Amino acid sequence: MDNNYIHRLKFAFEKTPTLFRLLSTIRSRRVGFGYSIESGEPEFHGITGRKLESHVGPLNFVSKKKPEPLTELETALLCWSACGPNGIVAGDIAGTQNLGTLMTFAGRTIPAAANDYCVDLIFTNDNGTFLYRPTHYRSKVVEIESEQDYSKITRWFQEGLIQLSKNRLDIDWAIVPGRPMGIWQYNLNKPGSTWFIPIVDVAKGMINLYFSIFEHMQWLITDDETGQPCGLEEWAKPEKLELPITQRTYEEVMLHMADYQHGMLIQNLRLAAEAIGLGCWIFGGFCEDLVLGGFRPLSNGLRFRYKVIDGKRNYIGIPKILEGFGLPSPWYKSVDDLVDRVLELKKETLALIPYQDKVEPEILKTLTQTPSEWCLKAVKSVLSYLYERYGRFPVYYSTFHSNLHAQVHHLDTDFYDKYLKKDYLTTHHREHFKIWHKGND
């Protein structure tokens, strides 16, 4: 690693604003190099070639600056901040209160229900489309302790990056009919920008949490249509499964749990962009089917495989890269295969636990004894019932979702100086190129 990288990593950890300062200045800043706003002049999207129509308006602006992509270091810092490795989780859950629900002890910069890693990060830029998949290995409780550890950020990025395509996504604001990417996203996916796309697998956490809600919470999953237990009659009794909860309600709970993780990833990314002095805007309100790849040939999107069942698209993943935990699936031939895979993932984490020697044997005993035999049978029974009756799992929602994105770019300060009151740009925005590109060479 050259001295420029080392110097800038040191700057990121030691000289960027504090969290509280960042919270005071953070804003959406949507105007980057090469962008335009209500110019009244048509333009052709630099990636897709589609014609973008624009009405003239009071914020009429056309950037005179050429697109400037984020550097590898800038991108690596953003990805790490979003969901990168940061050490080993504390695991401070009582063994009698289902410590075994944790799917891994490998910590990330975001929390997750049962630390289930149900969210992954994809981004698209001028070099193509990529999945950020850093190592699950952790070497110590806090991975980034000092200057000697800073270089891990770029190493994890370089070693963990998976290229999904050599091209950017073939999506822009001009796609019709309607406005599937939202009325506000005129500069979406422009040259020089980086579009960050978190992907959430709802089914993964849902299967894992079945073990908890059965053995420790006594929830009885019922069929929304019949009101009867979903294959759980054997255990529908006192001190086993007593509290009726419909499958739709359970899926809604788990969908929201996944969305929280998704949102925290985006907020971390947004704070990192602010610290570095980059522009960032967050957006939802678009058609996720278009992004995932359900509207071909209008757009290839991310080319996720999907099954249409009863008129609903169930996105199941990308072979050998993002293989979802839903059914039907080409990689899981049965409910047994699916549940066994979840249990395998949990067992793989036993070598990475945070406890002192004096308690470790008892903790390992607790972890290896879960789930109980009856609970394992119940989980497989509810999944078999749902899959046989409805032909899919989850029943009411797709396995994969992606409903909140971020675009990051180098800010064109000319727009803000021309139209905004002072103080909308910080010193870190105005000095970004001096610090991160041209200075200290």
Image (cartoon, grey):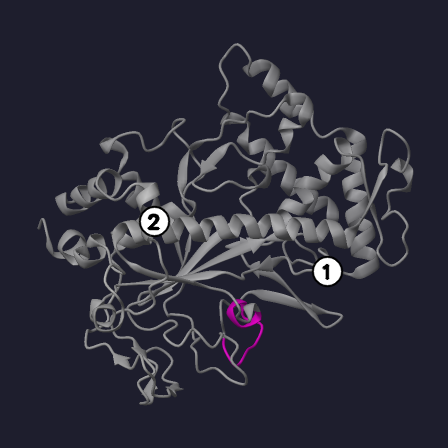
Quadrant position of residue 420 = bottom left
* Residue 119, horizontal then vertical, whole percent: 52, 50
Q: Residue tagged by mark 1?
A: 396
Q: Marks 2 and 1: CB-CB under 8 Å?
A: no
- Please state the horizontal and vertical placement of residue 244, each as a whole percent of the image: 84, 44
Question: Which amino acid is tagged 2?
Answer: Ser
First-in-chain label (2 vs 1) = 2
Which residue does the image show at 80% across and 35% down from the upper left? 218
141 left or right of 253 in image: left
Q: Is residue 3 above or below residue 396?
A: above
**Residue 284 drawn above or below residue 116:** below
Q: Secondary structure at mark 1?
A: loop
Return the x and y of residue 222 as percentages of the image width and height.
84, 49
In percent of the image, x 34 and y 84: which residue is there? 57
Whether residue 154 sits left or right of residue 183 in the image: it is left
Q: Is residue 110 shown in magenta?
A: no
For residue 215, the mark is none
131 shown above or below 41: above
Whether residue 129 appears in this view of the structure is no
In this figure, what is the number of numbered marks? 2
Which segment did they paint magenta?
A: 289-299
Residue at the spot of label 2: 24
